[in-house]
Amino acid sequence: MKSQDEERFTHRKAGRTKLFIIAALICGLCSPSYAGNDRTKRIALLPFENISGQTGLSSEVTAYLEDILKRKGYEVVSGKMVEAVLYKDRVRKTGGISIRNARALKEGLGVDYVMVGTFYLFAMVKGNPQFGLAARVVSADGAIQWANTAGSTGEDFTRILGFGTVRTFPELIPKVISQLFYTLPRADEDFGPKGKSSFLSGSSIPGVFGRVSGHRVMRTYVSEVYKLSRPIKVALLPFENFSERMGAARIITDIFLAEFFNARIYDVLDMGEVEEKIVEEDVWPYGGLVDEGVKKLRKSLNVDAVIVGTVENYDEGLKKFSSTPNVRLSFRMLSAREGEENKILWASYLEGSGKDTQVVLEFGLIRSILPLTIGLIDDTLSGL
């Protein structure tokens, strides 16, 4: 038999144990690990901008985008909920996102990330469908977390004896979107410096034979200043378009941004932030920058350098007399550091054709301008 003192002690001990368990549960629920890691990551899917020249893309392609994001574990916020916030904050362009607008979406929708993107190419040429697009994931503080560009034609999937050719858009679109999202981490994984996949993901002829450099024309100048002190934070300004293809400068700028980000050479800003500051500072990025313009961008964007460029030719091979893509462009990096404004750090001239990688017959031929352009830019960045 227990004494009264022993019973009272046991009773108090049991009470304290219950209180400890309750307190531990409450603390566990309120802990950062529960609030940040155990819940599903939310991502706002903004309407992709369409500069393909064709209509009727949004609903069908958006369904594919949402599906693949959900399969990767994200909770997708889209449609009217996103449009309401965009309308409230007067966000007109959705191919990029500024820091201010990213924060507005976080506060209005409770999202962790924002996905922006652009449709580039949607065309049927001689029974061969072509589709291309780009996407980026941006955090609430405006930092790019992931970026990629993908584009293919139905004939890119042709294998020996003609097997595997894709003839319709319903077949081609999901394949290209799968290429685009191949490197996107799952919701339970961290964004980080990971190797990017080949633009063909091993599914077309150049992927079978391995990557071929071809006879591309590339000339690059690198200054001694760049070699001694490489810039850390860089702003890519909208390119200038001298080609016949409307929207070509936007396409090239987006591809550059994705490839620069994936190369992990510099800390690059999203185009939405850059474009917002260009308007606020009244800086005209075309035809060359004056020193005062570079100084303004250095202060407003806090960058070491800016990149400007021109698109001289952008032929997607959609004309009757030409089914092979061709591209020609030039660009240069200008220092934004105090006392060095507008000094050329490096400059490049690039020119390429889909036939440059041809091995034999039509093996190795690049039919889509997006992988052609990506290859040119990647080859240039590999030398920096």
Image (tube, grey):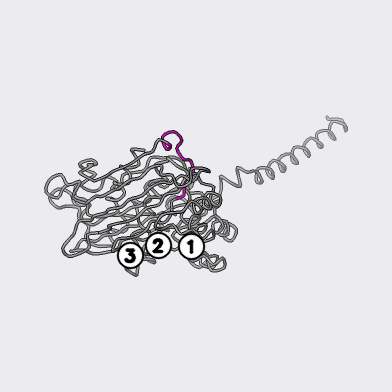
Q: How far apart are marks 3 and 1 (CA)?
A: 28 Å
Image quadrant holding the C terminus, namely: top left
N-term-proximal mark, 2 vs 3: 2
From the top left corner, tell me how far across and down residue 162 is, in percent: 14, 53
Q: Which mark is residue 62?
A: 2
Q: Is residue 6 left or right of residue 88?
A: right
Kind of residue indicated by mark 1? Ser
Residue at 25% over, 59% down: 315
From the top left corner, tell me how far across and down residue 343 is, in percent: 43, 44
Kind of residue indicated by mark 2? Thr
What crowding class fits label 3: few (fewer than 14 Cα within 10 Å), some (14-19), or many (20 or more)? Answer: some
Residue under circle 1? 78
Q: Distance between the residues labelled 2 and 1?
A: 9 Å
From the top left corner, tell me how far across and down residue 273 is, in percent: 50, 55
Kind of residue indicated by mark 3? Met
Residue under circle 3? 246
* Magenta highlight range: 225-235
What crowding class fits label 2: few (fewer than 14 Cα within 10 Å), some (14-19), or many (20 or more)? Answer: some
Residue at 40% over, 52% down: 308
For marks 3 and 1, give the one nearer the viewer. Answer: 3
Q: In this view, does 52 lie above or below 331?
A: below
Q: Tag 2's secondary structure? A: helix
Q: Disc 2 vs disc 1: Cβ atoms closer than 8 Å? A: yes
What crowding class fits label 1: few (fewer than 14 Cα within 10 Å), some (14-19), or many (20 or more)? Answer: some
